[in-house]
Amino acid sequence: MNHELISIENGKLIKNGITIFDGLYLHIYMNEIAGIICDDIQTKKYLNGFLLGEFELESGRVFVNEKRIFANDSVNIFPNIVTLIDKKSKLVDTITIEENIFLFSDPSFFIKKRKYENRFEALKEKLGVNLAADKKLSEITSKERIMIELMRAYIEKKNLVILDDLFGYLQKKEVEEIFSVLLNLYQFGITFLVRIGFEDEYLQKINRITAIKNNKTISLIDPEKTDMQTFARRLYFNENTIKLNTKKKIHSFHHKHGKPIMEFQNVSSSILQNINFSVGQGALLKIHCYDDLSCAQIVALLKGETKPSSGCIFYRNGLYKVRDVYSAIHQGVCFIEECAYDSMLFYNMSVVDNLGIPCNEKIENFWMLSKYPESIVKQMKNRMREISLNSQIKSQKSYTLLQIVYYKWFLYFPKVIVCINPFTDVDIYMREIVIDMIHQYLERGITVILVTSNYYTVDKFEGETIHISKGKQLESHPMINKK
């Protein structure tokens, strides 16, 4: 019988007056790869925080190594045995890869540095990791950074590693390489808890999946015996939610006549080399980057944070000249950032106030005349029926917050919307909201440019796709059909 590393029974957690868990059951066994799927991104974040020892349960039973502990003991025990690997790097940029792996577990590292050069090579061979020791931290990919953090978890003798949404920011091949390392590592006593989406591949490598809905555990799934896409549709969607259709893709509403609204002509920068594309009014363009640097550089050019070293960017009837993101907005080019529900709202204001913030930049005396906020309420009452538009932002669910971000630009009505990694750190409801909102943008004649490093984002939408790898534009991608 498998040995239980961590077990939670009937866990309850309340934060800021909001119930996060009420009936959490979680059983994590040693030497396995477990999965977890949540219906709410906030539930996922609090679960991670609890397992990292950031707070304790209000009630419930907690077991570690099959021994019950007091609830308040988890904040002292969990940090020593659990680590989290997600999109945010935990590495120190000012030291080497070897130092990041060994320094925090062995204070004598600097004295015995040569000894650890050999140890690093032995560790790579043992875990099946291919990584150059002399590579600079600024040059590593997300996949390599995860490899380094996995090696450090092994050296620090962590028992449980939480891997959060790998498919949200890695390529398919990179995830395969990560899972290859996981299969090596769990033979050495490390357990993994992987947050998944129901379309994720490699589910056959996961031993069991815990499903959480409405703040409680509702099912334990064997992925080898369950069609996860069918399961998720039945479990998480009903007539009152956005209908999930995994086969339906959004068609972009191309305006066949007239000049492109935005065009890159042989654009080069410190990272990019001779990038060429154009997009028409009301059309959808997907820019799929295979590395974070290329993705960041495309966004920086569109925001005006960097200038082309050669080539030109054209917008509407002339050159695209912007100083920063604010001047881009004034010219009708707006941006929706990663994790927009966290970074693009004012939590001390109401829903209608947040919706009207961009319009204030376009309409003089917007807040002085009541007819403008009233107009927003009138336009939005049929689109956001489930909430009070005069209620506070902080009382809303994450998927509602995401809707507010997209609708505020819908009301502003720009020429172009740039969506940056729109499927990063979202739950399954939020992903469907993103798809629906982009459809609404296109129907209204707003041009949408998706800049993403995630293959599944690309696959969800029809339209032209530009592929960029290490700054170079690729002619095609074998896994994506040409439209």
Image: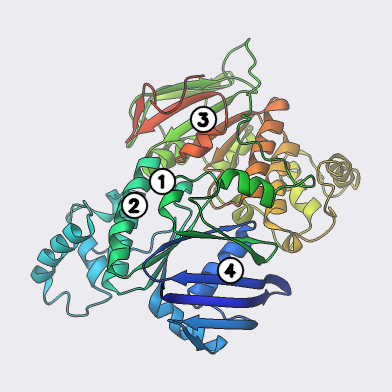
Q: Nearer the viewer, mark 2 or mark 4?
A: 2
Separation (CA) of disc 1 from disc 3: 17 Å
Give the residue number, with chain letter if any, for mark 1: 170
Name the secondary structure under disc 1.
Answer: loop
Give the residue number, with chain letter if any, for mark 3: 286
Residue 439: quadrant of the picture:
top right
Do labels 3 and 4 touch, CB within 8 Å? no
Separation (CA) of disc 1 from disc 2: 10 Å
Residue 443 % position (x, y): 72, 26
Separation (CA) of disc 2 from disc 3: 26 Å
| Residue type of the residue flagged with mark 1 | Leu
User: Reading the chain from its start, which is encountered first: label 2 or label 3?
Assistant: 2
Side (left or right) of 99 relative to 289 = left
Where 412 falls versus 255 (above or below)? below
User: Reading the chain from its start, which is encountered first: label 2 or label 4?
Assistant: 4
Mark 3: few/some/many CA within 10 Å (<14, 14-19, 20+): many
User: Reading the chain from its start, which is encountered first: label 1 or label 2?
Assistant: 1
Residue 62 % position (x, y): 54, 82
